[in-house]
Image (cartoon, rainbow, N blue to C red):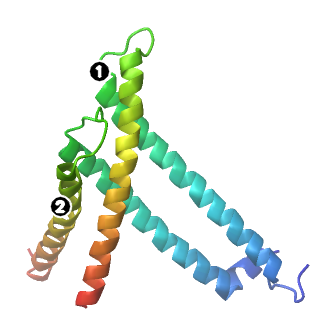
Amino acid sequence: MSLASLANDPELQKFVAEKELENQLTAQVHHLTNVCFDKCLESNGNLSELSSRHTTCLQNCVDRFLDCTTLITNRTIQRIQQGR
Amino acid sequence: MSLEPGKLDVSQRRQIMTTVQQQLAIQMAQELLQKLSDKCFKACVPKPGGTLSSSEQKCIGQCSDRYMEAWNIVSRAYGERIKREQQRQ
């Protein structure tokens, strides 16, 4: 097995590309959990269970964080286009 | 054994894929453990003493359980969000 054979194998390349995407998505889940655990559980892990209020908070947190990211991205693009 | 020089055969490819898969799984587990330790140490051990008290241990246990549950909830919510975004396009 040479490096050339690894690089030229289309099925392997497809596999690697899929895994990289999976990795990015998982990394995003790690980051979201990190942020939302603090926000929704107030950094308090000492609970015997998660209430439905906690669950709703976590779900909202994910959506609002992504909304926030989208907003910032669009705003940044606007600024760049306006040449500021 | 390759049938053609410079090409991978099926078993070689499968072997590489399995290795890559395993290493990614290990990496993910390590990252999760790191986050768990950080969060739960911060939440449960405000003033480190000579040992971990039983209440601290209980807190850490519950904390890691809750964090894993939160991870699953977030993962599901994220997946659904992506699906919604794709349907919108």
The amino acid type of the residue labelled 2 equals Asn
| Residue neighbourhood size for the residue with mark 2, other residues' Cα within 10 Å, grouped as few (<14), some (14–19), many (≥20) | some
Q: Are marks 1 and 2 on the same chain?
A: no
Residue B40 is situated, as x and y percent measured from the top left of the image, at 36, 33
Q: Chain of mark 2?
A: A
Residue A50, horizontal then vertical, whole percent: 27, 45
Residue B81 vertical position relative to residue A50 in the rendered view, above or below = below
Q: Which mark is residue A60?
A: 2
Q: Say which of marks 1 and 2 sits in front.
A: 2
Say which chain tag 1 marks.
Answer: B
Q: Considering only vertical position in the picture, is A51 above or below B86?
A: above
Which of the 4 image quadrants contains residue B13? Answer: bottom right
Q: How many marks?
A: 2
Amino acid bearing label 1: Pro
Q: Quadrant of the C terminus of chain B?
A: bottom left
| Left or right of B44 in this view: B5 | right
As helix, strand or loop, the secondary structure at mark 2 comes to helix
The residue that label 1 is drawn on is: B46
Residue B1 vertical position relative to residue B29 in the rendered view, above or below:
below
> What residue sits 22% from the left and 42% below the top?
A41
Query: How far across and down, in percent of the image, does residue A34 sit?
Result: 31, 48
Q: Position of residue B48 (x, y in %)?
A: 36, 15
Residue at left 33%, top 54%? A31
SS for dot 1: loop
- Classify the position of the N terminus of chain B by image quarter: bottom right
